[in-house]
Image (tube, rainbow, N blue to C red):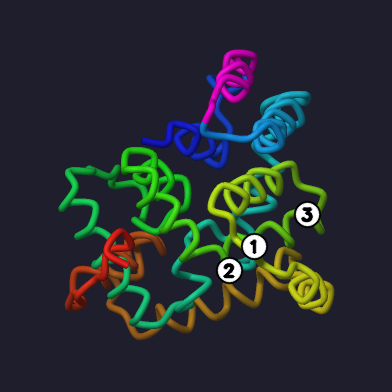
Amino acid sequence: MMRNLKLISLLLDYPSAEVFEYAQDLIQSAKADTKMSASEQQLVVDCIEKLTSQPLIDAQSDYVAWFDRGRSLSLLMFEHVHGESRDRGQAMVDLMAVYEEHGFEIDSRELPDYLPLFLEYLSQRPQAEALQWLLDMSHILALLEVRLDERNSPYAGLLACLLSQCDANIDRQPLAEQVAGEEADNTAEAMDKIWEEEMVKFGALSQEECGNNVLHQRRQELAQVQPLHFVDAAAK
């Protein structure tokens, strides 16, 4: 089991009062974790210190600005692979099946590809399996890291730690060039465009369905797709 993934999962989630209250305990936990190298421990410690050096409300505001406005920093992993296509729904159904197979129950508030939730699952799996999963998704983690680093976010260090843990050998220069050429998707204008696109999608739905939020709509879509046969990373 990799308890450090549980810690990173906690830190990548929406900032809570508990994280701020027990910041020093979390720092000591990171420093004592033998599953991490000294440099990996420092990446986690730096994030905790930067995150908790400000009022909680400011940390929460920053979190929303980074992860909830626009899609480039979405913590829903399959969104970076499949976008809003039907394939994403099928992939989530398969991931839910993997969770259920190993007795991992998820909170109904979160979709199965939410990165903090996925890391919590991996923290309960054997080390070799967890590291293989991280390696398989390393291209997504690396892109998120570069985008977060470009925005001077303390969360970039957590992604760097995950990549170091699985020994992902990724050339960040092409990613940096890609990110430098991207248009900001968290501006008011960009958010208006996304909202307009969502309204067009809802236009084909019934009045009752339109009254639900986007998360509920995605859950409804998941219930209608057929699962694919998922290949367990540990079998590779």
Residue kind at label 2, given as amino acid type = His
Q: Which residue is mark 2?
A: 139
Q: Is residue 97 left or right of residue 73?
A: left
Please report contact status of discs 2 and 1: CB closer than 8 Å, yes or no: yes
* Residue under numbered circle 1: 142
Q: Does the segment drawn in magenta span residue 94? A: no
Residue at horizontal 58%, vertical 34%? 36
Query: Foreground: 230 or 205?
Result: 230
- The magenta region covers 21-34
Question: Which quarter of the figure is the C terminus placed in?
Answer: bottom left
Residue 31 vertical placement versus 89 (above, below):
above
In the drawing, does residue 97 fall left or right of residue 89? left
Residue 69, x across and y down, in percent: 64, 59
Count residues near mark 1 (Cα–Cα under 10 Å), then give few for <14, some for 14-19, many for 20+: many
Mark 3 / mark 2, whichever is N-terminal: 2
Amino acid residing under circle 1: Ala
Disc 1 or 3, which lies upstream in sequence?
1
Report the Cα–Cα distance between label 1 and label 3: 10 Å
Mark 1 secondary-structure assignment: helix
Label 3 sits on what residue type? Asp
Give yes or no for contact between labels 3 and 2 (Cβ–Cβ under 8 Å): no
* Residue 164 image offset from top left, x and y in percent: 62, 50
Q: Nearer the viewer, mark 3 or mark 2?
A: 2
112 horizontally vs 21: left or right: left
Q: Which mark is residue 149?
A: 3
Q: Residue 9 got which mark?
A: none
Residue lying at 29% horizontally and 70% vertically, measured from the top left: 209
